[in-house]
Amino acid sequence: MKKIIITGGYGFIGSNLVNYFLKKNFFVINIDKLSYSSNKYNLKISKKSNYVFIKSDIGNKKIIIKTLKKYKPSLIFNLAAETHVDRSIDGPEAFIKNNIQSTFNLLESLRFHNKNSKKKIKLIHISTDEVYGDIINNKLRADEKFQYQPSSPYAASKASSEHLVKAYVRTYNFPAIISNCSNNYGPNQNPEKLIPKIIFNILNNLPIPVYGKGNNSREWLHVKDHCRALEILSTKGKIGENYNIGSGNNLSNLNLIKTIIRLMKKNYKLNAKFIFVKDRPGHDLRYALNSKKIRTKLNWKPKINLIKGISETIDWYMQNQNYFKNLKGKSHLKRLGLKI
């Protein structure tokens, strides 16, 4: 049975990836420090012989090295990160610590283990399209050679973590691959993020905040398509390479909100309204990925239609409203990213 580690396994993408590999009968070690973005509702796992949870920060080298020595996994998917842009505006220090320093400590733990082991552990480091910054030209999509121009402390911290990984690949012959994904959506996502925020506010008869004029465009990828891509990267990806993972489907935030309102009103008797609010500081207008590399070289492409995927996501939240009750704190009830 193949053993893998997934860091941040109680988060949104991480929990979906844990379930994805458990269904494939992998032995999954989930390492998560259980921060605000973690939710135990995300993994309803009864006792399984092929699943282990370890509560730890990936920056804790002692625990990470001990875990690697005990379980000897062949692969690590690193999803543990601070991810919310608005939070990074309010408090950038946590992003520097968790996305850069903790990534460095994880790399050092892996380097130590691989140096003293016959079989090296491969790392798949999950990053974001936000490292490329604002793609204002609507005819342009960022490929893997596009210049990094991060706008937020979050994006800058993720770009920094990538540079560390690339340095370890070159200097230490470190087996690592980097992925840059577009905005994910699907079940288990914290309502600090846009799609679950819209759904939560509609369910609770709260107005949906639209930043600025709502023209900001994002590329939307279903988390299940992302999980498939990550598996393909782990088996077919080339060491030292970056791979963009995107759907090619862009929507403005305002059109996304209107789409969700229409879909929810179609199937559920709910009221919904949105209001325009002060824009986010440094708000990028458009993210857009060129994902030709993974499509042509690794034969991956997204399978889930955007409207169908959003409809299924709405249904999941409607059927799992206890998810919201399991959230830590009440940050999803207030506006973040205004402390400048």
Image (spheres, helix red, strand yellow):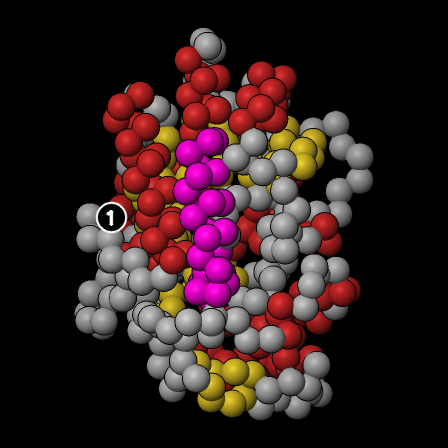
Range drawn in magenta: 83-106
**Horizontal and vertical percent position of residue 284:** 32, 70
Crowding at dot 1, Cα within 10 Å, few <14 / some 14-19 / many 20+, comes out as some
Q: Quadrant of the N terminus?
A: top right
Relative to 236, 226 lies left or right: right
Q: Which residue occupies the foreground of this view, 24 or 13?
A: 13
Q: Which residue occupies the foreground of this view, 291 or 64?
A: 64
Q: Is residue 233 visible?
A: yes
Image height of 94 relative to 209, above or below: above
**Horizontal and vertical percent position of residue 36:** 63, 55
**Horizontal and vertical percent position of residue 148:** 24, 53
As drawn, which residue projects farthest toward the right?
47
The chief SS type of the magenta part is helix
Q: Within the image, what quadrant is residue 20 found in?
A: top right
Q: Is residue 195 magenta?
A: no
Residue found at x 54% / y 88%: 274
Q: Is residue 92 magenta?
A: yes
Image height of 324 relative to 120, above or below: below
Residue found at x 64% / y 85%: 206
Residue tagged by mark 1? Answer: 144
Q: Is residue 237 visible?
A: no
Residue found at x 68% / y 86%: 205
Relative to 316, 229 lies left or right: left
Q: Amino acid at mark 1?
A: Glu
Secondary structure of the residue carrying numbered label 1: loop
